[in-house]
Image: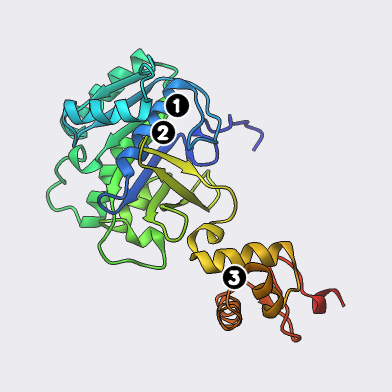
Amino acid sequence: MAAEFPEPRWAVPGIICEGVNLLAGPPKVGKSWMSLGLGLSVAAGENAFDTQPVERGPVLYLALEDTPRRLQSRMGKLLGGRPAPKELTLATQCPPLPQGGTEAIANWLDRNPDARMVVIDVFAKMRGPSLPGASAYDADYAAVGRAKRLADHYGVAVVLVHHVRKAGSDDFLTEVSGTNGLAGAADATLVLKRGRGQADGVLHVTGRDVDEAEYALSFQAASGAWCLLDGPVAEHTIGDTRATILRYVKAHPGVRPKDLSEATGIEISLARKTCARMADDCQLRRDAAGAYYAPEAGTAEDRA
């Protein structure tokens, strides 16, 4: 066990690491805007999600569902008049991985030894046909495995943009369209869900080298950019009334609904009912005297 191994290389620290990253989400949720925005950020060495510093390096972006005109339009919106970074390579066509796509990507990686990221949008366009007689699980595992061999050989982050099932689930991993072979073969799985309240989206992340986490995001329609919101997801995905109550309770631990109502202007009966429901939903903590605290804060009883 004396061997020393280098730390993994991050395209976006804490979120996208070297290896295969499966980025899934429902149609029209903004996966392509997100993946293109990340590609631009890494190629330019600018903050990803507007807040996350990244190391600049070459990026290959395969926009396989876009026409050149649509891709140009998206690029123009995201860049806002700035020139495209020289480290970004764009293509709207590439053969499936088992039919020449692997070699095409490998050739680009050979020409760009400092590459940070390869994005395949969408993966279905490049996975290729399944082997005859293979089970659905084995076929999915093998399809992602082709991309993983590239990622591992070159030490680069490969992002596979994919879809989710129509039916939702409490476990975001089971929402990825296809069998568990897809997420099983990937090094990390990221699922972008539509948000509620102040958040336009929530990005759920888990993987071998990345800590399981979720991030609240805001979509800037004017620029096409996804931006990371400060604070826990719960603060951004609850309704306006709950958000107001949570902010006030955090600033005034031990407050009662009557005082909260007077301070915020929320009608007293609504304040009482909403506080009680938030306690039931573990968004607030309530002590025996009826005072409320933020979920991470101790109550007066805890400190007694």
Q: Earlier in the sequence, mark 1 or mark 3?
A: 1
At x 69%, y 80%, the residue is 258
- Label 2 sits on residue: 38
At x 68%, y 69%, the residue is 263
The image shows residue 157 at horizontal and vertical percentages of 42, 33
The amino acid beneath tag 3 is: Gln
Near-viewer residue (84 or 268): 268
Near-viewer residue (270 or 201): 270
The residue lying furthest to the right in this view is: 304
- Label 3 sits on residue: 283
Q: Quadrant of residue 103?
A: top left
Q: Is residue 148 visible?
A: no
**Circle 3: element type:** loop
Determine whether, in the image, residue 264 is placed left or right of residue 8: right
The amino acid beneath tag 2 is: Leu
Near-viewer residue (73 or 16): 73
- Label 1 sits on residue: 42
The answer to whether residue 48 is above or below residue 283 is above
Q: Quadrant of the C terminus?
A: bottom right
The image shows residue 96 at horizontal and vertical percentages of 18, 34
The residue lying furthest to the left in this view is: 132
Please say if the residues under marks 1 and 2 sit with CB atoms less than 8 Å apart.
yes
